[in-house]
Image (tube, rainbow, N blue to C red):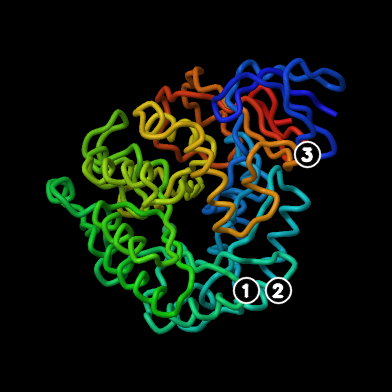
């Protein structure tokens, strides 16, 4: 039994939590007994849930493993992650998703829910064994070819129809491939000045519009990964106004960073640390994404944690891999972009980083409100702390963060997974 003293649930009044046998047994004042942990007035949130994590195992264990990735997640306050399917081999069979699920059970510092590929080998030609993955021990409910777009409209329609049978969802990486051939960064004034091939907003927006229409046509669930443009927000707002079952995510980096960093940043021009898919967009896009996350047009924050080894990032811009690590900085970046700006309170953060992602992934036992009888999946967060981002201190195996040397608000103090601390005093247990 553990008693966590002096925490503020969703930023409210101070209270103590008694945790017993993996659940929150009691919430009250002056609780004592068992092992006592001083919460120090930290904000208590339901354990964070990421719908979009790249754990890289199997196949790229030099970048991340289930063990290091879930350590990174726990450090960031996460108690569950969805592991994307673009591994090697691709998670497109019951066998591979069960392998990832078992690795999570054995080595995970948080729950690991494999995402199944939509198409065999992510090749966009033939549907993967969606039903077998759903029926497997991993009980897959989220399907995505993330990293690639399911651009064939017939295949996308079939996938949306298929997942209805088990209440699954297709998570689309919206990127029209022909419009983005060779694309290096956001298409706009900065790409023009730098002479880098542009990645037009319409390449994302056209796919989102099509998929919303397809999802409505077949009456299925669509989730849109990493929305990055103001135009995408307008399409989602329209789809939701129709009552269609469409959800969307935004990454922390798209809430904070802009494309002009490619030209001028503290780490110089053309620094591939800012190379990411979808690309960083303009200030106007960032403002639209923040407003959309605040008003619910965008439902959740998902990290798109994309670890890469140094040799794949520290190279010339055009050859560098796309992506950033994100699990250990996500909550701080959300505080900076959404809480300090007055757009969200802590209850709003809990909805968007725990409750709703768990609901979209159809997880039970995660994303539950912090009340008596609920599973003790808890994140304690000190929003008054200031943290200098030092990638060498990351639990992730990779270091490709765009925030190196920046001071971000807040610090994860502790994380509890079913009552067991995975992080205490900011350190892995
Ligand atoms: Zn993606």
Label 2 residue near ligand 1, CB within 8 Å = no
Disc 1 or 2, which lies upstream in sequence? 2
Indicate the quadrant containing the C terminus: top left, top right, bottom left or bottom right.
Answer: top right
Number of labels in the image equals: 3
Q: Residue at x 68, y 60 (%)?
A: 100
**In the figure, 280 relative to 342: above or below?**
below
Q: Secondary structure at mark 3?
A: strand
- The crowding category of the residue bearing disc 1, from other C-alpha atoms within 10 Å (few below 14, some 14 to 19, many at least 20), is some
* Percent position of residue 166, x then y: 62, 74
* Percent position of residue 297, x then y: 36, 52
Q: Secondary structure at mark 2?
A: helix
Of residue 288 and residue 102, the one placed in the foreground of this image is 288
- The crowding category of the residue bearing disc 2, from other C-alpha atoms within 10 Å (few below 14, some 14 to 19, many at least 20), is few
Q: Tell me the distance, in whole angstroms, between the alpha carbons under discs 2 and 3.
A: 28 Å
Q: Which residue is mark 1?
A: 166
Q: Which residue is mark 2?
A: 135
Disc 1 or 3, which lies upstream in sequence? 3
Q: Tell me the distance, in whole angstroms, between the alpha carbons under discs 1 and 2.
A: 9 Å
* Percent position of residue 359, x then y: 57, 55
Q: Is residue 392 visible?
A: yes
Indicate the quadrant containing the N terminus: top left, top right, bottom left or bottom right.
Answer: top right
The reply to whether dot 1 and dot 2 touch (C-beta < 8 Å) is: yes
> On the image, which quarter does residue 95 sit in?
bottom right
Q: Tell me the distance, in whole angstroms, between the alpha carbons under discs 1 and 3.
A: 29 Å
* Percent position of residue 21, x then y: 85, 38
Is 409 placed left or right of 416 in the picture?
left
> On the image, which quarter does residue 70 sit in?
top right
Q: Which residue is mark 3?
A: 23
> On the image, which quarter does residue 354 sit in?
top right
Is 305 placed left or right of 236 in the picture?
right
């Amino acid at each position: 039994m553990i008693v966590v003293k002096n925490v503020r649930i969703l930023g409210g009044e101070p209270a103590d939590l008694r945790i017993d046998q993996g659940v929150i047994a009691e919430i009250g004042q002056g609780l004592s007994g068992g092992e006592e942990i001083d919460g120090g007035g930290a904000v208590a949130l339901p354990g964070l849930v990421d719908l979009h994590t790249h754990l890289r195992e199997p196949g790229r264990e030099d970048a991340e493993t289930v063990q290091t990735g879930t350590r990174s997640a726990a450090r960031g306050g996460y108690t569950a992650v969805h592991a994307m399917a673009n591994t090697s081999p691709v998670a497109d069979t019951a066998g591979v998703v069960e392998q990832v699920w078992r690795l999570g059970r054995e080595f995970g510092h948080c729950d690991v829910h494999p995402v199944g590929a939509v198409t065999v080998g992510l090749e966009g030609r033939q549907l993967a064994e969606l039903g077998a993955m759903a029926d497997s021990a991993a009980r897959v409910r989220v399907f995505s070819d993330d990293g690639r777009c399911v651009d064939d409209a017939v295949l996308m329609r079939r996938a949306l129809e298929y997942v209805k049978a088990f209440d699954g969802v297709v998570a689309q990486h919206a990127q029209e491939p022909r419009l983005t051939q060779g694309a290096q960064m956001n298409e706009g004034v900065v790409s023009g000045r730098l002479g880098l091939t542009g990645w037009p907003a319409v390449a994302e927006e056209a796919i989102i519009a099509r998929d919303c229409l397809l999802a409505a046509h077949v009456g299925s669930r669509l989730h849109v990964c990493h929305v990055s443009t103001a135009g995408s927000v307008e399409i989602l707002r329209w789809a939701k106004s129709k009552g269609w079952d469409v959800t969307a995510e935004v990454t922390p980096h798209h809430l904070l960073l802009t494309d002009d960093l490619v030209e001028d940043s503290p780490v110089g021009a053309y620094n591939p640390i800012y190379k990411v898919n979808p690309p960083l967009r303009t200030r106007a896009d960032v403002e639209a994404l923040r407003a959309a996350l605040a008003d619910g047009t965008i439902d959740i924050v998902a990290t798109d944690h994309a670890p890469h080894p140094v040799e794949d990032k520290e190279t010339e811009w055009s050859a560098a891999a796309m992506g950033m690590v994100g699990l250990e900085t996500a909550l701080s970046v959300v505080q900076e972009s959404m809480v300090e700006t007055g757009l969200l309170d802590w209850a709003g953060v809990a909805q968007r980083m725990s409750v709703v992602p768990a609901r979209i992934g159809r997880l039970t036992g995660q994303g539950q409100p912090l009340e008596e009888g609920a599973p003790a999946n808890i994140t304690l967060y000190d929003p008054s702390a200031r943290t200098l981002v030092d990638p060498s201190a990351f639990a992730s195996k990779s270091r490709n963060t765009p925030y190196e040397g920046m001071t971000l608000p807040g610090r994860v103090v502790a994380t509890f997974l079913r009552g067991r601390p995975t992080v205490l005093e900011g350190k892995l247990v």
